[in-house]
Amino acid sequence: MKFWDHQISARRQTRRLLRVFALAVLLLVAGVHSALVLAWWLMAAVLPVHLGFPAGFLVTNIGVSLLLVLGGWWVETANLRAGGFLLAQRMGARAARPALSHAEQRLCNIVDELCIAAHMRRPQVMVLPRTDAINAFAAGWDEADAVVAVTEGALQWLTRDELQGMVAHELSHLHEGDTRLNMRLGGMVFGLELVYHFGEAVRERGGLAWWFGSAIMLAGLAGWLTGRLLKAAVSRQREFLADARAVQWTRSRDGLGGVLRKVMAQRRSTAQAPERSHYGNLSHPALQHLLLVDATQHSALERRLDSHPPLEVRVQRIYGRMMSPLPLVPVPDTPEPAYERAATVGIAVPGAASLASQADPFARFL
């Protein structure tokens, strides 16, 4: 995998999509004004008297539209600032317990090693118990509140190299600021949705207000749908970027590639026997865009709004060709030395030196 090329491409596509997103907001404001102008003309056409546009018609339309969009963005972003740790707790995650579990000790060691490689602050490590699905997520507004949570199924089915690839993917989201970007875009989409609801409230008053409410609803619906499509497209590019970053940091395509191939196998078995799987709170709407892979399968039409690319596409980009699913084999719960103790007595932690030498010298940018 040419991870540098994939990272450059993902960043370029992200910048292009963000410019289109900003343009969509401006077009929404212009669309609301145009729709209200059309509604005024239609209303004037059916009335027996001539009606001119009231004073401040343009300024009022633009001002109210921007107030709804930016106000909604501010409110929703403020709500999402509750923090990664609180979100993880709400989803049922708990702090990792390395002293009680060899698998969780291995997870904590991997996080420590990769944070050395990335020159980044260590996030809180958490586990989603009683969740068989192989998955993980990273959350947090800044480094002080960042968390990385993995499911119990990931600890059960993934080898050390595969778990390393999964954690590297999630740390990339924190390193690149993807969690903040997703929160801001989510807030902007909420602001676009407010325009639609405002038009709906105006329309319910009936009479002449019905014309103006319908016009605002039409423009708001178009803006909200465009915003959702663009937000999903940006999220998919950030997933491609995190995949490439994971391969760069681990220098292994079989790490993250093995994770995705095992997810493919798990989904096949789930489709044949859905009663055997326990997904916990992974299907919660607040968590969908943060996950390593989508928790639910969607139709071809709904995939346009997916925040993750198809598994097959991601695997093909990592390997350069199509790959078959990997069988699920439980990983032995063997002990390994605690990272802190090993560092104190000078014991070399497996993989730490090689990972540190692969640290990215470039500052993060979109």
Image: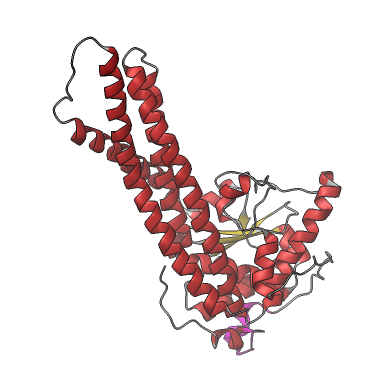
- Residue found at x 54% / y 46%: 286
Across and down, in percent, residue 325 comes to: 80, 65
Q: Is 115 covered by the magenta stretch?
A: no
Quadrant in which the C terminus appears:
bottom left
Q: Is 339 covered by the magenta stretch?
A: yes
- Residue found at x 53% / y 79%: 4
Q: Residue furthest top?
A: 48
Question: Does 321 appear above or below 76?
Answer: below
Quadrant in which the N terminus appears:
bottom right
Across and down, in percent, residue 346 comes to: 60, 90
- Choose between 298 and 285: the one closer to the eye: 298
In this orientation, does residue 105 appear?
no
Left or right, 7 with respect to 196, comes to right
Q: Residue furthest left?
A: 55
Boundaries of the magenta span: 337-351
Question: Exactly how many numbered labels are in the figure?
Answer: 0
